[in-house]
Amino acid sequence: MNKFKCHFCTICNGTGCIDQLPGMGGVNRNINFRLNSDGWEVLRKENPLVFINFIERPVNERIPQIAFAPITGAVENIGFSSEEEYYSSIFSAIHKTGIELCVGDGFPDDKIKFGLQAIKRIQKTDKNAKANFFIKPFQNKKIFEHIEMVLPFAKSIGIDIDSYNIATMQNLVPLEKKSALQLQEIQKFLNSKNIPFVLKGIFDKDGIELVKQVKPDAAYISNHGGRIQTRIGSTAEFLQNHGEELKNYTKKIWVDGGIRTALDVATAMAFGADKILIGRPFVTAYCKNGETGICQKALEFSLLQYAK
């Protein structure tokens, strides 16, 4: 019997794991999970010229920057025997495809530590390997402890600003809603180390306001795959409605949520996303077919088939 909690649905659109938390589902009957998954096709159909104009750009302007989205809770949510097993196995497989790695934070601290260990192991054969690290909104004192831990291995460091609202994190560890001043303190330190600063979890008016005040290196649009208590909507419609506005206050736009095909990747790029982060598809591909599944999924997300 398969040990993993994923149902390996033909299409990963949030209909097969409704309310399964812990598990692969989301909150509120997976409403945002499902909206995320449908949102990119809706965006293409409602804005065909934007999409076509992007597809007709020169090939070198359509090469996507894809990263493996930060995912933790591998034991309780996915079904791995340990967080260490998850990081060491899936990170090795994804790194071989050339896709960027992201390490998430959580409770207990072992979660980020095991992610860090996985990056250290990869560096034994690829000394240039680094990851994007995302830290939960602890009190700043603890955030700085985690930053010091990961700094030598970080391509960028971000704060998961909305994760104080994650159902599976509540009552486990004190998290707080961050002010602009608290975030600017972190940003100032990272700037002194030449490490890009990312605000993750931009999905409502409060998030937009923080981007305006903090002006991070990257604004990461995300609703945690529909696993967080927030407004109802998709990351696709948020990117469409607010991407241009956010560009005035940040260098890069990152986005995740419901991206399942190369067409979805292209759609996100057409609407201004600089980096596309993908989570569940890589996890489920690995759980089903190991490294082969990861390689197949990476090829599926390639935009090479649209080259002229």
Image (tube, rainbow, N blue to C red):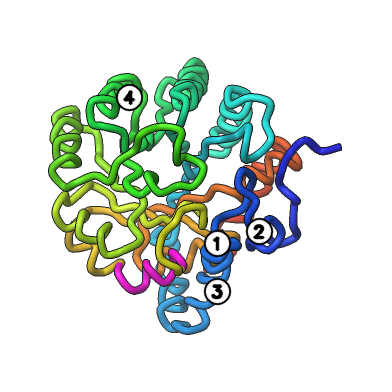
Residue type of the residue flagged with mark 1: Asn
Q: Which residue is mark 4?
A: 146
- Give the mark nearest the N terminus, 4 or 2: 2
> Residue 296: which numbered mark, if any?
none
Point out the tag, 1 or 3, that comes first from the N-terminus. Answer: 1
| Disc 1 target residue | 28
Kindly identify which numbered label has been placed on residue 41: 3
Query: Extreme front residue here?
Result: 171
Query: What residue span does the magenta drawing correspond to?
Result: 234-242
- For the residues labelled 1 and 2, the Cα–Cα distance comes to 8 Å
Q: CA distance from mark 3 to mark 4?
A: 38 Å
Determine the CA span between mark 4 and mark 2: 33 Å
Please state which of the two labelled residues, at mark 4 or mark 2, is closer to the viewer: 2
The answer to whether 186 appears left or right of 80 in the picture is left
Name the front one of labels 2 and 3: 2
x then y, percent, for residue 193: 19, 27
Foreground mark, 4 or 1? 1
Nearest to the observer: residue 135 or residue 274? 135
Residue in the picture at 32% in, 24% down:
146
Residue type for callout 4: His
Residue 268, located in which quarter of the rendered image? Answer: bottom left
For marks 4 and 1 on the same chain, the one whose residue lies earlier in the sequence: 1
Disc 1 from disc 3: Cα separation: 22 Å
Q: Residue at x 34, y 33 (%)?
A: 155
Q: Position of residue 238 (x, y in %)?
A: 37, 68
Q: Is residue 280 magenta?
A: no
Mark 3 secondary-structure assignment: helix
> What's the distance in space between the residues labelled 2 and 3, CA to CA?
21 Å
